[in-house]
């Protein structure tokens, strides 16, 4: 796998990765255009809820989009979105409302009451309703359930596309902004320059572009950087990776 590094590596490994990843930013504008075109093709649903979480407005952004056409078919086959299509976007999560120090909250933001748990003792009505509904299983499954599933999957897909657009826009932002690629690379380079951060080794004195020494044990004591100590093991030190005195460098030189 290409660039299979994460938290432990040598500086020369990271330099190679950094050069490649920065070259990929030239593709970001085209990727965003492609994602936006796909978002426009898929469309979306607009939602509005009252203070009790009851839907007051559910409508597709455009009847010619994929989601818009699914919604029209859903309604044409008898679906009532206000009562049956329980969907939301990522921007409208359901959460438990805030209680007080004297009384715990019993309600979710969509108006549902949190169950106290335990059995429902509803076997008699459950059996009767099941008997009334079972003979229409095929109609319910093919006319309603499958369409609801397609609408939910399409909305999830659009949420993922929007999240990717946001991520790409953040990556190409100015290096002074958190989350930008330049900001991230600068953070790693600062850790490499910190001689007390052993995981990202500054291997300028013993280049190791293949990372053969990246996972060497951390030295029990730090050898004299002037060469006064005899090194008997492969190890990571405050001054970069070291090889036993007189041994060939692990990179094959």
Image (tube, rainbow, N blue to C red):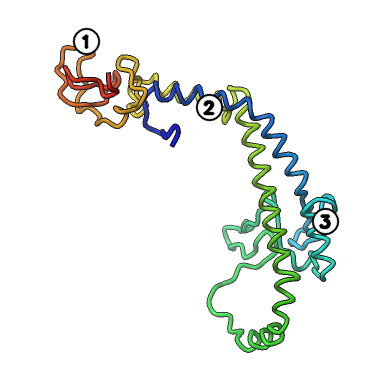
Q: Which residue is mark 3?
A: 59
Circle 2 SS class: helix
**Residue 204 in picture, x, y percent from top left:** 34, 15
Q: Horizontally, is 165 left or right of 51 in the view?
A: left
> Looking at the rendering, which quadrant does residue 199 occupy?
top left
Q: Give the mark nearest the N terminus, 2 or 1.
A: 2
Up-down: is 21 above or below 225? Answer: below
Residue 226, which numbered label? Answer: 1
Q: Residues within 10 Å of mark 3 (few under 14, many from 20)?
A: some
The quadrant of the picture occupied by the N terminus is: top left
Circle 1 SS class: loop
Residue contact between numbered discs 2 and 1, judged by CB atoms under 8 Å:
no
Residue plotted at (37% across, 21% down): 194
**Residue 241 in picture, x, y percent from top left:** 28, 22
Q: Residues within 10 Å of mark 2 (few under 14, many from 20)?
A: some
Residue closest to the eye, 77 or 125:
77
Residue plotted at (62% across, 27% down): 172
- Real-space Cα distance between discs 2 and 3? 41 Å
Residue 21, which numbered label? Answer: 2
Residue plotted at (18% across, 26% down): 233
Report whether residue 133 is seen: yes
């Amino acid at each position: 796998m290409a660039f299979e590094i994460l938290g432990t590596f040598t500086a020369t490994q990271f330099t190679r990765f950094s050069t490649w990843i920065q070259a990929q930013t030239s593709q970001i504008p085209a990727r965003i255009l492609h994602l936006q075109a796909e978002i426009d093709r898929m469309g979306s649903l607009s939602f509005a809820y009252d203070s009790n979480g009851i839907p007051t407005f559910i409508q597709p952004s455009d009847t010619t989009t994929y989601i818009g056409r699914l919604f029209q078919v859903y309604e044409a086959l008898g679906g009532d979105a206000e009562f049956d299509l329980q969907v939301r976007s990522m921007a409208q999560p359901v959460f438990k409302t805030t209680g007080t120090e004297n009384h715990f909250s019993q309600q979710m933001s969509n108006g549902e009451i949190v169950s106290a748990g335990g059995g429902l003792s509803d076997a008699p009505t459950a059996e009767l309703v099941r008997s009334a509904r079972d003979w229409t299983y095929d109609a319910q499954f093919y006319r309603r359930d499958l369409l609801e599933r397609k609408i939910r999957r399409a909305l999830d897909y659009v949420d993922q596309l929007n999240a990717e657009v946001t991520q790409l826009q953040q990556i190409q932002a100015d290096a002074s902004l958190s989350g930008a690629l330049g900001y991230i690379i600068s953070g790693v380079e600062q850790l490499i320059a910190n001689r007390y951060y052993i995981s990202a080794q500054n291997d300028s004195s013993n280049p190791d572009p293949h990372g053969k020494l990246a996972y060497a044990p951390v030295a029990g004591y730090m050898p004299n950087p002037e060469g006064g100590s005899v090194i008997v093991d492969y190890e990571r030190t405050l001054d970069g990776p070291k090889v036993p005195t007189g041994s060939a460098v692990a990179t094959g030189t």
